[in-house]
Amino acid sequence: MRKLFLVLGSVFTVLAIVFSVMPLDTLAFLPIGLAILFGLLLLKKSDENQKKLPNILLFVSVLCSVFVLGKTLIIKDEVVKDKQFEQQKVETQQEAKQELEDLEKDLE
């Protein structure tokens, strides 16, 4: 049972690191929570001399959790209006209108 918790805790800790680096926002808390859960179960099933790895896994999971929480609270997603693109869009519409008017004049 300890080996199963060790494998699951390690896998979810690696996934927690990967998800916390990627821009997945709060979706990263799923593998972080599972890594903490399996880390605690592993810590409970371990003997006194086997508690170093579970402590490391828990520390990394908590560190990822703090990183994701900080990234979520500090970094704000803002949509900035691109004035140059808007200007080009207006100019393109005016050119298209002018071309249509020229085509209408040519047909008459």
Image: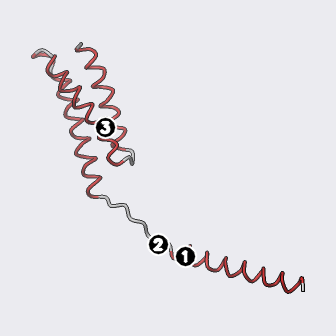
| Residue 45: quadrant of the picture | top left
Within-10-Å neighbours for mark 3: few <14, some 14–19, many 20+: few
Question: Residue 44, relative to residue 93: is it above or below?
Answer: above
Between disc 3 and disc 2, the foreground one is 3
Residue 27, percent from left and from top: 34, 43
On residue 84, which mark appears? Answer: 1
Q: Amino acid at mark 3?
A: Leu
What residue is shown at x 27% (from left), y 58% (from top)? 74
Q: How many marks do you count on the picture?
A: 3
Question: Residue 7, relative to residue 98: is it above or below?
Answer: above
What residue is shown at x 71% (from left), y 80% (from top)? 95
| The C terminus lies in quadrant | bottom right
Q: Which residue does the numbered mark 2 point to in the structure image?
A: 81
On residue 34, which mark appears? Answer: none
Residue 20, percent from left and from top: 33, 43
Q: Earlier in the sequence, mark 3 or mark 1?
A: 3
| Callout 2 secondary element | loop
In depth, the one of 47 and 103 nearer the eye is: 103
In depth, the one of 26 and 59 nearer the eye is: 26
What residue is shown at x 27% (from left), y 36% (from top)? 32
| Residue 62: quadrant of the picture | top left
Q: Amino acid at mark 2?
A: Lys
| Callout 1 secondary element | helix
Between disc 3 and disc 1, the foreground one is 3
Between the residue at mark 3 and the residue at mark 1, the CA separation in whole angstroms equals 40 Å
Q: Amino acid at mark 1?
A: Gln
| Residue 104: quadrant of the picture | bottom right
| Callout 3 secondary element | helix
Q: Earlier in the sequence, mark 3 or mark 2?
A: 3
- Left or right: residue 78 versus residue 64 is right
Q: Which residue does the numbered mark 3 point to in the structure image?
A: 30
- Left or right: residue 97 versus residue 59 is right
